[in-house]
Image: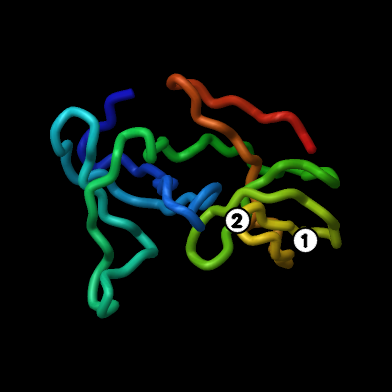
Amino acid sequence: MAFKLNDLVEICKKEEGFSGVYYRAILLAAVGRKRYLVRYENRFNEDGSRFLTEAVDSDEIRPSPPQPSGYNFAMAERVEAFVDFAWRVGTVIRKVDPNYYVKLDCNGKEHHCPFFKVRRHLEWQNGTWLSPATG
């Protein structure tokens, strides 16, 4: 998929510790044929003075996923929880209305998440959003 200037996207780096972690970013420019320059919304440069800007590979970028409102998640359902300024893939392990406890894939930690910081997990494959199997 070709992205456009100023598209709101999510970046999942292919580095250790970043698997299943999606950071929101604005697409600034194409860098060659398979890389893009992005500016993160919630990641900062080393001295913390401004938003981090970097070139990323196209296979590390996905558009922002569609999200229906009022979604009710079941136990063991795959979700993404907004924790530490990023959407992190995990599994619902408990529900305490209206909130959820989510076990994150990236570090195995459990987090108590308000319902508005939990969304359905979708995979971006070949230009299509797919819902992975529960489990």
Residue that numbered label 2 is attached to = 106
- The residue shown at (25%, 79%) is 47
Residue 33, horizontal then vertical, whole percent: 18, 28
**Which one is closest to the eye, mark 1 or mark 2?**
2
Mark 2: secondary structure: loop
| Residue 17 spot, x, y in % from top left | 51, 57
Query: What element does badge 1 sit on?
Result: strand
Q: Is residue 41 above or below residue 77?
A: below
Residue for point 78% across, 44% down: 73
State the mark number for residue 101: 1
Q: Is residue 122 left or right of residue 40?
A: right
Q: For the point 14% across and 33% down, which residue is it?
A: 32
Count neighbours of disc 1 (C-alpha within 10 A) and say few if under 14, some if 14 to 19, many if 20 or more.
many
Instruction: Answer left or right for 98 relative to 107.
Output: right
In this rendering, the answer to whether 99 lies above or below 35 is below
Q: Residues within 10 Å of mark 2 (few under 14, many from 20)?
A: some
Task: Identify the image quadrant of residue 77.
Answer: top right
Residue shown at the point (49%, 24%) measured from the top left:
125
In the image, residue 17 above or below residue 72:
below
Where residue 13 sits in the image (x, y, percent)? 41, 48
Give the image location of residue 60, x and y in percent.
38, 40
Location of the C terminus by quadrant is top right
Disc 1 and disc 2 in contact, CB within 8 angstroms: no
* Badge 2 amino acid: Cys
Q: Amino acid at mark 1?
A: Tyr
Please tell me whether residue 113 is drawn above or below residue 91 in the rendered image: below
- The answer to which of marks 1 and 2 sits earlier in the sequence is 1
- The residue lying toward the viewer, choosing from 80 and 107, is 107
